[in-house]
Image: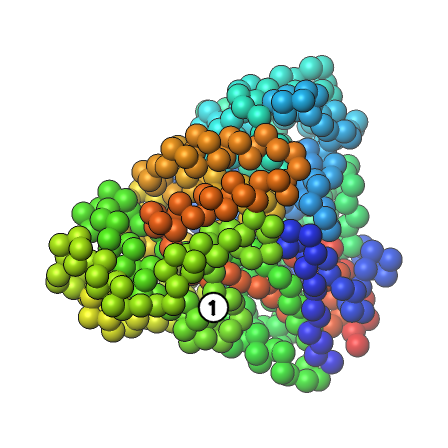
Amino acid sequence: MNRRTMALPVLAGLLAPVLAGCGSEQDTGAGGDAIVVGTTDRFVADKQTPAPFDPAAAYDVAAWSVMRNTFQTLVRLPRTGTEPEMDAARTCGFTDAQNEQYRCTLRKGLTFSNGHKVDAKDVAFSLERVLRIKHRSGPSSLFADLDRVEAIGAHEVVFHLKKPDATFPYKLSTPAAAIVDSQTYPARSLAKGYELTGSGPYQLDSFDNKADTAVLSKNPHYKGGLTLHNQQIQLRFFNGSHSMEQALKAGDIDIMSRTISPNQVQELDMAQGKGINLVEQPGQEIRYLAFNMQAPTTRKKAVRKAMAQLIDRQKIVKDAYDRSTQPLYSLVPAGLPAHRNSFFNIYGEPDKAAAKRTLEHAGIHDPVKLTLHYTSDHYGDATAKEFAVLKKQLNGSGLFDVKTEGVTWDDYRPAATSGKYEVYGYGWYADFPDADNFLAPFFEKDNFLGSKYSNAEIRDKIVPQTRRQTRRAGTTGAFGRAQDIIAKDVPVLPLWQGKQYLAARDDITGTEWALNSASVLQYWELGRGAGD
């Protein structure tokens, strides 16, 4: 049968799935054939990205989906709730009242997939390597406040922070803090190719771009808190979601993951008797426009503000996404306690007259010429529709003369972060479920966008102040203030917030636990049982 499993959100928008007969820890097994997972994600090892799965460089949900399953971190995101739980570490915690020193004790007997032992020196090496390489589009900004890492003996690691940071344990749960083998990985440069060496639940056996497949098998050396419900995962890469859906219906793949188009959500939901289950979960994926703050046109605040006054998010959600997303009026998504609808509070409903006044007051009387760039193959087929809607809205006002251009992800990402585009669309998936992660990576000095926008209050006051507070509910007011500042300056323009979808053959179990709050597919949750 077709079954749509609804997972309801709890605290801070995390995923707390309702069990709907799709399997659980008690009824899944670790045997059976390989589970075949389809995805439209693509990975290329080239000059720009010599190592797609190197923790010092990878900073996107596609790569992290592979890395979370193959690398180990000291702590990891929990199934439910907010507090990180132990993974490679046996214990972790702050050792001072100022939240400036964080100490972890490793589990004993940890081993990399190549047989090398994991010790405290590997942990220190891994974090220091990320900061040393400081890759342009990598995750080093997450650890900007890390002063030094101290390895004490084989099992003790102490992190000394420059400033208090109550979110540091959450950052250690991300693949940016993946533990790599200090005997295998170069200390000052990126690894080459697709090979990776980790101590996580799976090892990467093969990666074949020509055959559009990758194979991961259970890591026999893994020691951690996870229970694996399968022996092997095979990834199959598709050029589009339509061909992936056909493969699912034909039984050629077991799971259809990123990306499921809005039309497919409706079709899979309405289909009956096809042996497929659709799982829907709340998500923290956001989509936004980023501005080059040094380009001649978009450096003008009036241009960015006029766009904020014209864009109709409701129409984007309706016309491009068939209401499978929801309008977003802040970088911080709904569901997090600190969320505030700042863009709506300041600009209200789309208003052509207000946008015209904004431009005229800045001495701009002719239609503003811009090219909106988007990635044609990374976020799904609906992205082109989204930018067609944006173009229609802006040009329909008579105040803009907009063109759109789609670029493949391999070329798009380096061009966007190196300042070659004036306006471009980007997505963000939470590294961890806290408002800090939707603000600091965008506006700290070495931000992942490479943006030159700087606001002293956000950077020097709000972010440091909120990182002193271990009770995260107490950060709501300060984060609300930051969202108001962003809405007034418009260095970015939030558009919509997504939901998470997964489609699976009905003999696949564990799907209700498989997607975490960062939209990463946790392969270990998947098992094979009897179909309905």
| Of 166 and 48, the residue lying toward us | 166
Q: Amino acid at mark 1?
A: Gly
In the rendered view, tell whether residue 231 sits above or below residue 451.
below
Quadrant of the image for the N terminus? bottom right
| Of 358 and 282, the residue lying toward us | 358
Which element type, helix, strand or loop, lies under badge 1?
Answer: loop
Question: Residue 271, how many percent across, how many down?
Answer: 64, 83
In the rendered view, tell whether residue 276 sits above or below residue 449.
below
Quadrant of the image for the C terminus? bottom right
Question: Residue 13, how many percent across, how many down?
Answer: 64, 55
Residue at (63%, 22%) from the top-left corner? 98
Q: In the image, 248: left or right of 494?
A: right
Question: Residue 285, how many percent across, how many down?
Answer: 53, 56
Q: In the image, 344: left or right of 110?
A: left
Q: Can the viewer see residue 399 in this picture? A: yes
Question: Residue 498, how many percent across, how many down?
Answer: 53, 62
Residue at (51%, 43%) from the top-left corner? 479
Residue at (33%, 47%) from the top-left corner? 489
Q: In the image, 245: left or right of 232?
A: left
**Label 1 crowd (10 A; few <14 / some 14-19 / many >=20):** some
Q: Can the viewer see residue 113 in this picture? A: no
Q: To which quarter of the image does residue 374 belong?
A: bottom left
Tag 1 residue: 240
Q: Pick out the residue farthest to the bottom.
A: 272
Q: To which quarter of the image does residue 449 belong?
A: top left
Residue at (59%, 63%) from the top-left corner? 500
